Image (cartoon, helix red, strand yellow):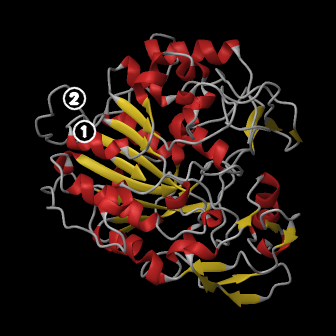
């Protein structure tokens, strides 16, 4: 299955004990294994762990900083808007811009609170944006924008051929650092009343950060402090621990990033697992955290695609507004096409999502389930021979929904974080149907151009 997606933490004995309980599945009250989905699965490939569905491979590819309305405004049958409401009550049309036209809009927790406005979704004109080398400036109506369909057409084509989810919410109300923690752990909580928020004070974001780097922490009363622990954490378990315990192969494909003086070149990747001490300082780092991200193609060619993967794009291909590039759809399409034409197609799902909203307007108010979220709505596409064709799922999802499906599919215990409450993405599939043959998706740039592109060596996001 391929799935296309600043804070604070300290050690907590209770969390470690809970994590061990989950891994051993022997503590009283530990989460039970999710029920198997009754389907007839085809034979698995040599070395693969058996699954409860025909999906034996999952690759998580994560794009950057786009709201649902920003990419799918006007998509037929989806809940979306072509206009938005400002803080004065004025209704204005969403201006049409290109992917390469973007400025970096404030998308920290404070900006979320302003834009959300207690569910009214009417104050996106009250935040700032950032021009390189200049102080923050009032964004005005700039966040009220949608990308030209000419540029989003590859995404729309994927939606029309497979499944589009229009109620996927980023689980966290801040930017990429915490968003990526939720994608691998379903949480960024340090304890029962505090969680990571926003981003660390230095880069890289993790155990390779400069000495003295701190994280930001939000408490359950909504107060943020900026004296959190060094971002090399053992505060919560991750899905990697469950996969390792079950001998399920996994990799995290990330772009190479040049950071002068940062030390070990193996650490110079934009990876969520760099912030997880047990991974960064253990055998998983050399074995499973891979750079550059285009190694994915080589693994598919060599028949060594792991069963669970995450793919992080190069900055230029990320859809991030600051990249000033429109190659994101071509990058995503190249992954889909390469998987589709490989031997993996009949047992793989490609789920494409964006890690957070980037400050852009969206008209659907995210339900507030706890003091850290839910965050703003982002698009999710599910591409698979078993994905419902041309289907729009209105089911409420969050990032734990992906983790829950992994747990169900590989018969893993629950992490006991937001995966426990989330609805699995299982309803995006029809496992009673025969697998559909793959049809290539067109994009402006082809696979060879995307595979051989010159790396930017730039952080995918620094907020």
C-alpha separation, residue under disc 2 versus residue under disc 1: 7 Å
Residue at left offset 59%, top offset 65%: 66
Please name whichever residue, 29 or 390, is drawn nearer the observer in this view of the structure.
390
In percent of width and height, residue 15 lies at 64, 18
From what the image shows, is residue 206 above or below residue 371? above
Tell me if 420 is positioned left or right of 432 in this view.
right
**Closest to the observer: 454 or 360?**
454
Which residue in the structure is indicated by mark 1?
Answer: 56
Q: Residues within 10 Å of mark 2 (few under 14, many from 20)?
A: some
Residue highlighted by disc 2: 48
- Counting every numbered tag in the picture gives 2
Residue pictured at 88% horizontal, 42% vertical: 223
Mark 1 crowdedness (10 Å alpha carbons): few <14, some 14-19, many ≥20: many
Disc 2 element: loop
Q: Residue 155, image x and y in percent?
A: 40, 70
Q: Position of residue 335 (x, y in %)?
A: 33, 55
Decide if residue 241 is in sight here: no
Q: Quadrant of residue 195?
A: top right
């Amino acid at each position: 299955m391929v799935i296309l997606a600043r804070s604070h933490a300290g050690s907590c004995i209770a969390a470690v004990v809970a994590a061990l309980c989950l891994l051993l599945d022997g503590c009283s009250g530990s989460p039970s294994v999710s029920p198997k989905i009754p389907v007839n699965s085809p034979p698995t490939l040599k070395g693969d762990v058996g699954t409860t569905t025909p999906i034996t491979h999952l690759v998580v590819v994560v794009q950057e900083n786009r709201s649902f309305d920003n990419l799918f405004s006007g998509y037929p049958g989806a809940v979306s808007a072509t206009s938005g409401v400002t803080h004065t009550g004025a209704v204005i049309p969403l201006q049409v811009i290109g992917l390469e036209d973007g400025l970096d809009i404030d998308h920290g927790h404070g900006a979320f609170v302003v834009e959300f406005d207690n569910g009214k979704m009417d104050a996106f004109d009250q935040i700032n944006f950032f021009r390189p080398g200049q102080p923050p400036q009032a964004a005005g109506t700039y966040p009220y924008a949608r990308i030209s369909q000419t540029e989003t057409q590859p995404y729309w084509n994927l939606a029309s051929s497979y499944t589009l989810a229009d109620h996927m919410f980023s689980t966290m109300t801040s930017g990429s650092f915490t968003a990526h923690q939720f994608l691998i752990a379903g949480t960024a909580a340090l304890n029962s009343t505090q969680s990571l928020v926003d981003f660390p004070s230095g880069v890289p974001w993790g155990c390779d950060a400069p000495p003295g780097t701190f994280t930001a922490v939000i408490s359950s009363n909504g107060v943020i402090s900026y004296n959190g622990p060094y971002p090399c954490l053992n505060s919560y378990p991750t899905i990697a621990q469950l996969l390792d315990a079950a001998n399920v192969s996994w990799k995290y494909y990330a772009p190479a990033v040049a950071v002068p003086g940062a030390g070990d070149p193996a650490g110079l990747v934009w990876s969520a697992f760099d912030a997880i001490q047990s991974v960064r300082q253990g055998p998983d780092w050399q074995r499973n955290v891979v750079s550059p991200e285009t190694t994915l193609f080589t693994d598919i060619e060599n028949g060594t695609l792991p069963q669970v993967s995450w793919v992080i794009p190069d900055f230029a291909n990320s859809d991030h507004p600051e990249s000033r590039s429109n190659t994101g759809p071509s990058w995503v399409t190249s992954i889909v096409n390469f998987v589709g034409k490989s031997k993996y197609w009949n047992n793989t799902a490609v789920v494409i999502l964006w890690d957070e909203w980037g400050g852009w307007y969206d008209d659907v108010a995210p339900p507030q389930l706890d003091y850290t979220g839910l965050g703003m709505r982002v698009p999710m596409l599910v591409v698979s021979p078993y994905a419902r064709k041309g289907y729009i799922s209105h089911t409420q999802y969050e990032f734990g929904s992906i983790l829950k499906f992994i747990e169900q599919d590989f018969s893993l215990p629950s992490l006991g974080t937001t995966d426990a409450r989330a609805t699995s993405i299982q309803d995006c599939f029809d496992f009673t149907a025969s697998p559909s043959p793959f049809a290539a998706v067109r994009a402006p740039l082809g696979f060879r151009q995307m595979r051989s592109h010159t790396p930017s060596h730039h952080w995918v996001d620094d907020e």
